[in-house]
Image: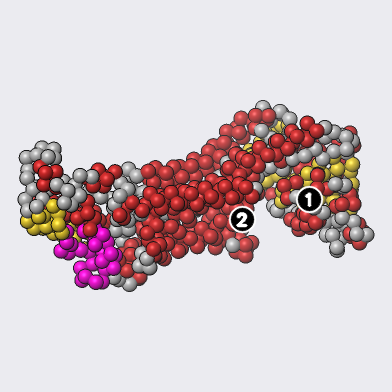
Amino acid sequence: MATREREFDRHAKRRWTAQDFTGALVPLSTSVAVAFFFADGGATNFLDIVALPYGVGVVSGLIGTNLFLVMMVLAARVPIIDSLFGHDRALELHKKLGKPVLYLLIVHMAALIVDYASRVNTDVWSEIVTMLGVNDLLLSFLSMGVFVLIVITSLVAVKRRLPHGVWHAIHLLSYVAMYLGMFHQFTQGTLFAEGTAGRAYWLGLYLVATVSTVVFRIILPVLRSVRHALVVESVVVEGPGTVSITMRGRELAAAGFQAGHFAHWRFLAPYLWRESHPFSISAAPTDDRIRITVRELGDATSLLQHVRQGTAVWFEGPYGIFTESERTTSRVALIGSGIGLAPIRALVEAMDFRPGELTVIGRARNESELFLMDEITRIAHAKKGIVYSLTGPRGRRTPWLPWAESERGVSISALIDKQSEVDFYLCGPGAWMNSLVADLRSAGVPPHRIHNEQFAW
Amino acid sequence: MRPTATFVTGMATMGVLAGGIVLGTGILDGTATGQNSASNSGSTPGNGSVGNSGSTAGGSTAVTDGTFDGPVVQTVYGPMQVEIVIKGGIITTATALQHPGGDGTSDQINAQVVPILTKATTDYQTVQFGNVSRATISTGAYKQSAQAALDQAGFTG
């Protein structure tokens, strides 16, 4: 037993080390960019008030652009990043960086306009007119315009009112903004002039962002979709508005699917082929079969309830870290709500449990929405695990629990002993999960033992 | 990120920035680039520059004392013209007759940068020193005009 625990411990520490090294690249690459400017004598600009706008302008441009390229890499679904941090956390950071990057680039633009205007002793407006006459600067002004548009359409209030397709089309213009803004960085000033180490470094960053996007968002998904040739084999009703879709394919092991993973699935059927949608796999994957469970939540998911046998399926994935690789200890609690039980079903089957190590908690408004709970219960019992099914309206004191349990003062500590030594895998709606995480934290569960994936789609 | 990793990353980030600053300090005072230190050694003022200039490669040209005006070099911000005075084979003064900005006090950038350039010229007895950051265009024009003046004098030091 002790060696098993040590093995989990070693595995977790290796992962954290890899995460820390990768995460460190964000501040480090940013500081390298700024250091190139300092090595070119740029630090002296901060020693005197006249030179300050130039120093601030260049440094904010360097940090902003470096972080912008980081955002591109985060959105590129690079396998190493995805397997270490997960798709949702990568995108969370991507979203968090959007506004700061815009502000940095605005500061960059404003400070340098002021600086250039003061150099030739002219006013800001005529300096802008002069700048618009320089090709590369004109492109960078256009780039700024596109970037402002992208950030505005991504503000929560605006994004909600836009059709997803329109938002996505505007968002794809990021790549245009990225290249429009690139030219002036190499032609204005000497920092990245021909023959400098800075130029090689900076071009390298652009190359990494571009190549990772093209390879991991386009080439790899297409190659995988063609190679594995998935087709719909069967569609089974699991409950109200919910079906399990089993797909058959070739050599699926090579795609690296694990229980807990999700992928973006594109069903090549009328109306469905235009968009891909993310669904978790809902059974341990095999070399020739993979299953997802889909709840009717919108247009596409309702069409999927009636998808025909033999429909070809393309996919981008597998993605996510809601898998056994995140496990840090022997005891595990798998907790799912509603359709969030789909990945729980896959995990309960695929994870390695000794007697007494597993607890499963299923939560739904009523029995019929405890999707896949029969399968989950059967497998969990076979692995000598404990299963709780909790149904009923949402509790008041402890919203993740049903009303009755909540009123009796039940919390996670009543269901699982020594909670701080248990790995918790949670999947369900955001508000439910927040309530559960709060309960876990107040029961003393450390953050690294809490693994969750939001079902926000 | 774990606390230790955050600390180490923070220190590394600071280290990279500090490294940049250290590398960069040489640029304004002219001590960091290889060119500077090479031309600096053996050709500092009062250190036998006449003999020095006589023993340079080729050795055919002797340094002529006198005042030499470089050509007017046009930049997008205005003209730059440098005057060099050589006495006893040493650059004694370097002056910008014209510099971008034209009407003198108006252009603060050049007001700052030109003294640095002229001082560097007399200090190092060459214009082969590093760029003054943020005044790349002025520096380039200065060097071009000054180098032409030095060529007129046959100054190769």
Mark 1 chain: A
Residue at (16, 51) in percent of width and height: B46
Residue at (64, 50) in percent of width and height: B3
Which amino acid is tagged 2? His
- Relative depth, front residue between A311 and B78: B78
Residue at (73, 50) in percent of width and height: A447
Q: Residue A310's quadrant in the figure?
A: top right
Q: Which residue lies furthest to the front in this view?
A: B47
Q: Mark 2 points at which residue?
A: A164
Q: Residue A437's quadrant in the figure?
A: bottom right
From the top left corner, tell me how far across and down residue B106 is, in percent.
Answer: 26, 71
Residue at (13, 52) in percent of width and height: B90
Start and end of the magenta stretch? B94-118
From the top left corner, tell me how far across and down residue A332 is, in percent.
Answer: 81, 41
Q: Is residue A123 left or right of residue A163?
A: left
Counting residues from the N terminus, which is met first, the one under dot 1 or under dot 2? Answer: 2
Q: Mark 1 points at which residue?
A: A445
Q: Is residue A217 visible to the viewer in this orientation of the structure?
A: yes
- Residue B111 among magenta residues: yes
- Relative depth, front residue between B7 and A254: B7
